[in-house]
Image (tube, rainbow, N blue to C red):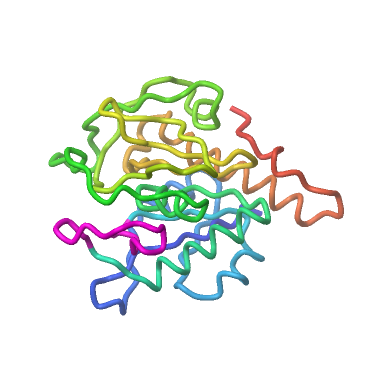
Amino acid sequence: MRPLIIVSPSVTDDLEEIKLSRVCFRAVEAAGGLALAADYFRADELAERADGILLSGGGDIEPSLSGDEPDREHRGFICLERDRFELELVKRAAKKGIPILGICRGEQVIAAAFGGHIIQHIEGHGQSVPKQETSHYVNIKKNSLLYDIVKTERIPVNSFHHQSAGECPGLNVSAMSDDGWAEAVEGRDGFVLGVQWHPEYLCGDEKQMRIFRALVEAAGRYGDAKNTVLPYNGRDMLYSG
């Protein structure tokens, strides 16, 4: 069976409808997984059933949840219900060793869940060209999960954010932009990865597609392990290549 990837979607401005680009489903499907969008409740039950977690992009995170002061001039759309749900889901998933991938906002949610701060506004990272085009490069550190996945120290990415993961003692920063902002964070055990760009729109590039394959492969190993009586070690979930 395909690994079940629970996807946390965005929400409309009136908070009454969830929304998620179909490219997320296509990327997970092409990688061999089964994607299922979830509303913002029952994080405990979802963590019991999920083989992997995918946090999609979206608006800002409520600053108080990461111990930060709001920037009222640049503050974007906030859904407190989503914030609380995703933070709980990440914490439960990380504790159980469930593989987690965060995209754009999702990277920042991972950072906040691990005790990090969110820089409330940066300039120059909202591209004007289409989502399927890249606008800048990121520099990837060797000896990182991300490097093991994409096999390169420098990769072109798209960019649609005005916030950035800041200081985060519980995670490693594994990629930086040329102007010095965090572009990827990852856990120190198992498969926990957040990328600041949107690889789902760049899956025509094999290196970007590998990010989703890595998530699904790790989720498959997690699912196999949870369905056996053998002890499971989250460190075994690293990407195979």
Q: Is residue 137 above or below residue 212?
A: above
Residue at left offset 32%, top offset 75%: 17
Q: Is residue 173 above or below residue 234?
A: above
Q: Does the magenta stretch include residue 191?
A: no
Residue at left offset 32%, top offset 45%: 164
Prevailing secondary structure class for the magenta stretch in the rendered image: loop
Task: Answer with left or right where residue 53 lies relative to residue 66.
Answer: right
Number of marks: 0
Task: Answer with left or right where residue 56 lies relative to residue 234.
Answer: left
**Quarter of the image where the N terminus is located:** bottom right
Say which quarter of the image contains residue 21: bottom left
- Residue 216 position, x and y percent, is 57, 45
Residue at left offset 55%, top offset 75%: 42
Residue at left offset 40%, top offset 58%: 67
**Quarter of the image where the C terminus is located:** top right
Task: Answer with left or right where residue 9 lies relative to residue 223.
Answer: left
Say which quarter of the image contains residue 45: bottom right
- Residue 4 position, x and y percent, is 59, 57
Q: Does the magenta stretch include residue 59?
A: yes
Instruction: Give the magenta part as a residue range.
Output: 58-76
Which residue is nearer to you in this view: 14 or 219? 14
- Residue 157 position, x and y percent, is 30, 33
Which residue is nearer to you in this view: 144 or 17? 144
